Image (cartoon, rainbow, N blue to C red):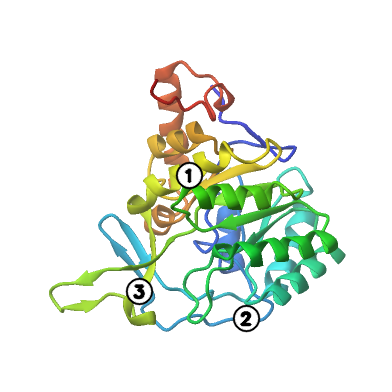
């Protein structure tokens, strides 16, 4: 029985990671991830300069998941790049760190990518095109023309491994359009999905919303979004060229959820809401639960079932 996962020519003990934005703001939190049973981990999506983010309260746990409108709080690009370089110096390239960026404009994204390209960082970069919680800023990945234009510029200046974080899509035509764009470029992977944007949760006792920014509108995570996440993982797994791998994110609370994401075609898995609720011990729990499911089904490795979801004839 093995959960070992090969991803971008690296071998990971298991496919589990944190979702960017959860338990990865500070070096202390990143170190906790590094010493946990996660197979890999990723930094907080950063902007070139430090951001305080949206006013509190901006995150709220709800019975079926969470709602948040964080607004990209982070300690700035240099803070995370310094950590990444120090991590690589200590650990080498055997267990690469994932480094997430989310500029407030195309120009800012290109600036950060150029700085990564010129640096000694050799890990895996994730370009987040799907932050739904910055007031006045639309999600770039819902603008197909703008996404195509940005990616054309990106690959003129960036040659290191690059993944793209995507929002959820809800229409087959949109799956087709985005896949057609992504298949034109040497993208390493797609991370699907970010939170489902602009949900609303109400406290009926006080008759108010539960988060302050954007009049209570925020991104949904957790159990609410698993069916949408699975649909997006499957849709892109069946549309993208084989070289583009999938990281499945959304609604992973237990081993069964992890199994379903893998069955849909994900190679790595990211956990957000449940990591926030439970802490880093979740990686050990879900690994054991996934192993139990695999043993019951007679699977010895993830590759025996990954991507092999069956349709009804």
As drawn, the label of residue 217 is 3
Q: Residues within 10 Å of mark 3 (few under 14, many from 20)?
A: many
* Residue that appears at 44% across and 42% down: 230
Q: CA distance from mark 2 to mark 3?
A: 24 Å
* Residue that appears at 51% across and 58% down: 167
Which of the two residues, 106 or 102, is positioned nearer the viewer here? 106
Residue matched to label 1:
283
Residue matched to label 2:
50
User: Where does the image place residue 225, in percent across and percent down from the top left?
Assistant: 37, 52
Q: Residues within 10 Å of mark 1 (few under 14, many from 20)?
A: many
Which of the two residues, 188 or 152, is positioned nearer the viewer here? 152
> What kind of element bears circle 3?
strand
As drawn, the label of residue 19 is none
In the visual, does 8 lie left or right of 169? right
User: Where does the image place residue 136, in percent across and percent down from the top left?
Assistant: 50, 82
In the visual, does 90 lie left or right of 202? right
The quarter holding residue 44 reads bottom right
Marks 1 and 2: which is nearer the front?
2
Closer to the chain start, of discs 1 and 2, is 2
Residue at far top of view: 298
* Residue that appears at 78% across and 65% down: 153
In the visual, does 139 lie left or right of 120? left
The quarter holding residue 25 reads bottom right
Marks 2 and 3: which is nearer the front?
3
Q: Residues within 10 Å of mark 2 (few under 14, many from 20)?
A: some
Q: CA distance from mark 1 to mark 2?
A: 29 Å
Compared to residue 102, the image places residue 212 above or below, namely below
Compared to residue 217, the image places residue 252 above or below, namely above
> What kind of element bears circle 1?
helix
């Amino acid at each position: 029985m093995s959960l070992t996962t090969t991803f971008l020519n690296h071998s990971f003990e298991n496919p589990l990671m944190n979702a960017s934005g959860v338990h990865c703001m500070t070096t202390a939190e990143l170190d906790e991830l590094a010493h946990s049973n996660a197979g890999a981990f990723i930094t907080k999506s950063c902007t070139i300069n430090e951001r305080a983010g949206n006013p509190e309260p901006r995150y709220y746990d709800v019975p079926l998941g969470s709602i948040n409108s964080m607004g990209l709080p982070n300690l700035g690009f240099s803070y995370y790049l310094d950590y990444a370089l120090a991590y690589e110096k200590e650990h080498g390239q055997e267990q690469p760190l994932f480094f997430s960026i989310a500029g407030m404009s195309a120009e800012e994204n290109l600036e950060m990518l150029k700085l990564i390209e010129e640096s000694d960082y050799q890990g895996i970069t994730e370009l987040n095109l799907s932050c739904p919680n910055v007031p006045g800023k639309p999600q770039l990945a819902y603008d197909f023309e703008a996404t195509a234009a940005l990616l054309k510029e990106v690959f003129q200046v960036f040659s290191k491994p690059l993944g793209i974080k995507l929002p959820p899509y809800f229409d087959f035509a949109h799956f087709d359009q985005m896949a057609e764009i992504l298949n034109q470029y040497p993208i390493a992977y797609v991370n699907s999905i970010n939170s489902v944007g602009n949900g609303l949760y109400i406290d009926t006792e006080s008759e108010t919303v539960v988060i302050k920014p954007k009049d209570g509108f925020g991104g949904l995570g957790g159990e609410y979004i698993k069916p949408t996440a699975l649909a997006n993982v499957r849709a892109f797994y069946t549309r993208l060229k084989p070289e583009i791998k999938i990281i499945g994110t959304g609604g992973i609370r237990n081993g069964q959820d992890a199994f379903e994401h893998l069955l849909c075609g994900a190679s790595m898995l990211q956990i957000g809401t449940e990591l926030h609720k439970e802490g880093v011990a979740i990686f050990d729990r879900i690994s054991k639960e996934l192993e139990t499911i695999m043993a019951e089904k007679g699977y010895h490795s993830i590759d025996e079932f990954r991507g092999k979801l069956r349709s009804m004839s």
